[in-house]
């Protein structure tokens, strides 16, 4: 493997992501690599139901989610910078695996470091695995880190 210059770390702010973040920071520091910390927001979709919910409510939910995600990303970037790692945050909307692989390619990442929840059986069947889809579609090596 050639020198690692750019590392992409997708985070959903879970324990599994925290373990992967620690590894990503360690690798970035060791290789003097730039670290991109990314979070993918899912779009809020109106659901048919018993009552009317105004578009303003959906907009408020989206704005709040975006603000909270950016705060958490900023905290992760600050933590990486304390370890003397060049880091920046990226907040995007869409399907997690699609956006992660797209960003890895557009940022010319040499490595993706992603957490995995370690689900098996029916949970994996029904919930799927973003990490496994990223492994299958990324243009670069992917390191999966199991959450504690």
Image (spheres, helix red, strand yellow):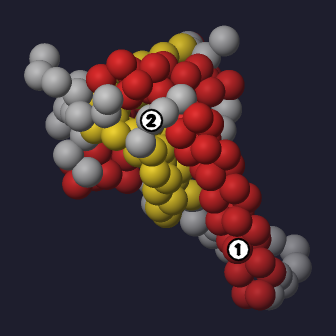
Nearer to us in this view, 132 or 49: 132
Q: Mark 2 vs mark 1: give the one in front.
A: 2
Question: Seen from this angle, which residue lies furthest right?
Answer: 51
Quarter the N terminus occupies: top left
Q: Is any part of residue 88 visible from this angle?
A: yes
**Callout 2: helix, strand or loop?**
loop
Residue 3 occupies quadrant: top left
Which residue lies at the image location 38% right of the left edge and 28% below the top edge? 28
Instruction: Tell me if 58 is positioned left or right of 133 in this view.
Output: right
Instruction: Tell me if 86 is positioned left or right of 46 in this view.
Output: left
- Labels 2 and 1: the sequence-earlier one: 1
Q: Position of residue 30 (x, y in %)?
A: 36, 19
Give me the disc on residue 2. none
**Callout 1: helix, strand or loop?**
helix
**Residue tagged 2:** 85
Dot 2 crowding, Cα within 10 Å, few <14, some 14–19, many 20+? many
Q: Compared with residue 139, is residue 57 higher up or lower down, i.e. above or below?
A: below
Which residue lies at the image location 55% right of the left edge and 22% below the top edge? 22
Which residue lies at the image location 73% right of the left edge and 87% below the top edge? 55
Residue 53 occupies quadrant: bottom right
Nearer to us in this view, 115 or 97: 115
Quarter the C terminus occupies: top right
**Residue tagged 1:** 63
Q: Position of residue 69 (x, y in %)?
A: 66, 55
Which residue lies at the image location 45% right of the left edge and 45% below the top edge? 87
Nearer to us in this view, 81 or 76: 81
């Amino acid at each position: 493997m050639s020198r690692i210059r750019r590392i992409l770390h997708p985070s959903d702010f879970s324990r599994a992501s925290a373990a992967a973040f620690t590894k990503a920071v360690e690798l970035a520091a060791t290789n003097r690599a730039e670290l991109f910390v990314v979070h993918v927001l899912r779009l809020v979709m109106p659901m048919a139901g018993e009552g009317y919910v105004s578009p303003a409510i959906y907009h408020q939910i989206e704005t709040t989610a975006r603000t909270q995600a950016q705060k958490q990303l900023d905290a992760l970037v600050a933590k990486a910078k304390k370890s003397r790692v060049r880091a920046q945050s990226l907040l995007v909307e869409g399907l997690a695996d699609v956006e992660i692989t797209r960003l890895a390619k557009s940022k010319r990442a040499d490595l993706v470091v992603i957490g995995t929840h370690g689900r098996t059986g029916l949970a994996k069947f029904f919930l799927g695995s973003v990490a496994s889809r990223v492994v299958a579609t990324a243009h670069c090596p992917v390191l999966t880190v199991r959450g504690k």
